[in-house]
Amino acid sequence: MYHDVVVATTKMNCLLGLVRIILALLNLLLFIAFAAVGIVGLLLKFNDKFLFGLLEKVTTKWPQNELEEVVKFIQQNGSGLAIGFIVLGFSVAIIALIGLFALFCKNRFLGFIYIALLGVLAIIELGLIIYLFAIPNNLNKAAFKVLNSSFEHLRVNDSLTEPSLVLWNVLGSDGDEFCCGLNGYGDFNGILSTLQYPSPCCEMNATTAKSQQPSQTCDQNGAKQKNVEGCKEKIEVFLKEHKTLFVGISCGVLAFQVGTSTIAFLLPPFSASLDNTRFAFTLTCIYTLLHIVVLLVMCLLYKRWKVE
């Protein structure tokens, strides 16, 4: 009898040790991945060469001078995205690091901090996803707010005037298809008299127009005559096609959080440190159910968006 108890205990300890190693590896991967996200955010915010190289790989057909102007515009107006990468990346990396210390040091206090932070992170993630994706047009509004600010820079002479013009030259050209501003050439009414309208507003590719002799330009009359449609629908389609990817990644992260936090609650010293075993089991079930509800909401939203 005693021998059977010893064998069972040994097997249980081996199983718990294996689970602890798996959780440690997962947290290590999480730490590396999100630390990399934070570093990318820092580079996007403060290193124009990194952003230039990144854009150059995705847009090999853009001339170098246009790329430089677009980089300048993104760094000035896309700081929110970079800061989001920095905060999210390093926050999750720190949580994963706390999880590693809790698992290897078997520290109850660090373990509860780790579990609590995972729970808070899940709620924040759900809130952000609902705000950006579940509430109609919120994501589009955020993107259009940045793009609308570019028109103001074209009406004053500042450091973002030229980058804003180049941005619309780039956004408006897609092979032989063209679009002009968000809602048409009227978006550019009132721009500085020294500036021309973006070439796509006159159904011209910016690079081709400049390379011709004499170089072709686009003014208000030419844009009015061509009356090219705006880029609003094109941008909305792009955002719609890519939002499911973001939601899918978020569901995966939440699934990881549900698994790790639940298993961590059942591992010593967390469960063993509670005086009442029944209370520990009840607390674990409630915590797990809350995470599963969050995960189900995310997956339902993902299914709905994919159908749309």
Image: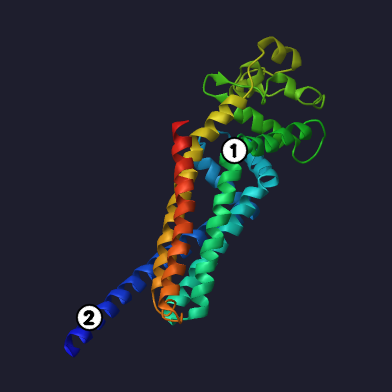
Work out whether residue 295 can be spotted. Answer: yes
According to the picture, the residue beneath numbered tag 1 turns out to be: 64
Q: Residue placed at 61% from the left, 16% from the top?
A: 203
Identify the residue at horizontal 44%, vertical 38% (top origin).
303
- Percent position of residue 42, x then y: 61, 57
Q: Residue at x 74, y 20 (%)?
A: 186
Is 286 on the left or on the right of 230, as rendered?
left
Residue at image point 69% right, 9% down: 225
Q: Nearer the viewer, residue 75 or 21?
A: 21
- The quarter of the picture where residue 150 lies is top right
Q: Residue furthest top?
A: 225
Query: Can you say whether 80 is above or below 281 in the image?
Result: above
Q: Position of residue 69 (x, y in %)?
A: 66, 39
Place residue 131 in its image quadrant.
top right
Q: Amino acid at mark 1?
A: Gln
Secondary structure at badge 1 equals helix
To which residue does mark 2 refer? 8
Residue 136 on image: x %, y %: 60, 35
The quarter in which the N terminus is drawn is: bottom left
Q: Is residue 43 visible?
A: no
**As drawn, 237 above or below 36:** above
Q: Is residue 189 above or below residue 263?
A: above
Residue type at numbered disc 2: Ala
